[in-house]
Image (spheres, rainbow, N blue to C red):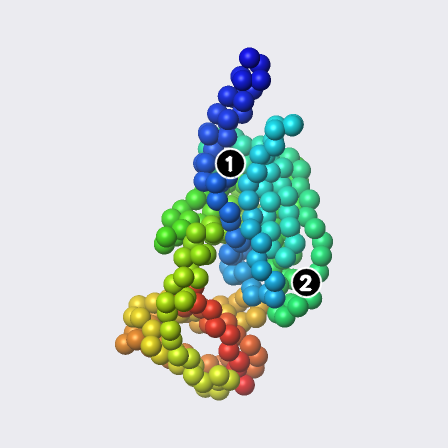
Amino acid sequence: MKKALFLLLSGGFLFAQNSELFSNDWHISKIVTGGQTVITPMMDIALAKSDFVTYTSPVGYAFNSRHFNSCQIEATFSGSNIFTRVNSACTLGMYGGNNVTAVNSYDQKHTDFYIVPTGTSYQYEIVPNGSGKTLIVTNTLNGNQIYYNNVNAILAAREANLKKSFLVFSNPVKDQLTVDNIENNLSVKVFNMLGQKMYEGKSADKKITINTQNFATGQYILIIQDEKVYKFIKE
């Protein structure tokens, strides 16, 4: 009887939270610190899933947030959209592949977000994102945020990528980059390898031309509709 009552209470407590926290796998997509947004940079290894898990002995909850390094945050829930840090720990590896500066800088922001004093609270929100969902975790003290997309959104993006075909020329680029054979009114963004946004616009007449005269020499990432990713070089 006691065991049945315990299971009922613990199950009811989980139900009080948004069940989508626990039923989805999440992938980190961007970090906002001090009002500055940085998207997850490209790296040589696959991006591992982040997930919320429950423990039964002792009863507890944890969030495993993963980029290159991983952080585990033991937490308690209060209300329907707040969790509070009880304890946390992060791995401390150093990435050494391509795009090393951007990846390690981003990874440091990720670990700093969760290595905080005991009692720090985070607000979470799950919002629709096309065919998937986005989890937004906000530090209630400083307003910094991490965004995560669920697996369904990522798979949908990959499927959409396979169906889309566009032309990019020239690469390497000197004064302008042209993207042709794309649908109208698609979001087009360019980021440098530090994750800083260099350009944002919309496609029209099934193409878009980007002035790159003021871009510094180096590699850049073109992103169409937050799905299709293309790397190019500015000479």
Q: At numbered mark 1, what does the secondary structure look like: helix, strand or loop?
A: strand
Find the distance from the CA under tag 1 to the CA under tag 2.
32 Å
Name the residue type under label 1: Ile
63 up-or-down from 163: above or below: above
Q: Tell which of 116 and 87 is nearer to you.
A: 87
Q: Pinpoint residue 65: horizontal percent, then vertical percent.
A: 59, 48
> Where does residue 119 sit, x and y in percent of width and height?
62, 35
Question: Observer-nearest residue: 231 or 217?
Answer: 231
Q: Residue at x 45, y 43 (%)?
A: 125
Q: How many marks?
A: 2
Q: Quadrant of the N terminus?
A: top right
Q: Residues within 10 Å of mark 1 (few under 14, many from 20)?
A: some
Tell which circle, 1 or 2, labels the residue nearer the N-terminal end: 1
Q: Describe residue 98's horizontal placement relative to residue 209 as left or right.
A: right
From the viewer's perspective, tell me whether residue 192 is left or right of residue 131: right
Which residue is at a point 45% across and 40% down the rendered structure image?
Answer: 20
Q: Residue furthest top?
A: 1
Residue shown at the point (45%, 56%) measured from the top left: 154
